[in-house]
Image (tube, helix red, strand yellow):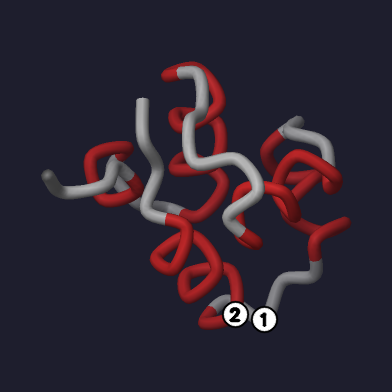
Amino acid sequence: MEIDTAKLKALRDERVLSLRDLEELSGVSANTIWRLESGMHKQAHPRTIRKLANALGVEPSELRKER
């Protein structure tokens, strides 16, 4: 699934979380989060999106890229 990279970064920044903080909260590696935020990876497994959304306190649909 395509992820909204800008939204992911904005949500992390709003919550004042470092990459490592979000890694600990979500179980998704900081390297993967960085690659998603930087646009190196625009696709993410639905499970990854769910983990990040749960850690950020949002619905997974909020992290999916609108078509």
Establish if 16 lies above or below 48.
Answer: below
The one nearer the camera, 61 or 41, is: 41
**Residue occupying the far left of the picture:** 67
Direction from residue 17 to residue 65 in the image, left or right: left
Residue 53 coordinates in the image, percent (x, y)? 44, 43
Indicate which label's residue lies in the foreground, 1 or 2.
2
Q: Which mark is residue 16?
A: 1
Q: Give the Cα separation between the discs numbered 1 and 2.
A: 5 Å
Could you tell me which residue is drawn at 65 percent across and 61 percent down?
Answer: 38
Establish if 20 lies above or below 50.
Answer: below
Residue 26 coordinates in the image, percent (x, y)? 68, 38
Question: Badge 1: few (under 14), some or many (20 or more) residues near its Cα, within 10 Å?
Answer: few
Residue 1 coordinates in the image, percent (x, y)? 36, 25
Counting the numbered discs, the total is: 2
Direction from residue 44 to residue 27 in the image, left or right: right
**Residue occupying the far front of the picture:** 40
Could you tell me which residue is drawn at 12 percent across and 44 percent down?
Answer: 67
Q: Are marks 1 and 2 in contact (CB under 8 Å)?
A: yes
Q: Which mark is residue 13?
A: 2
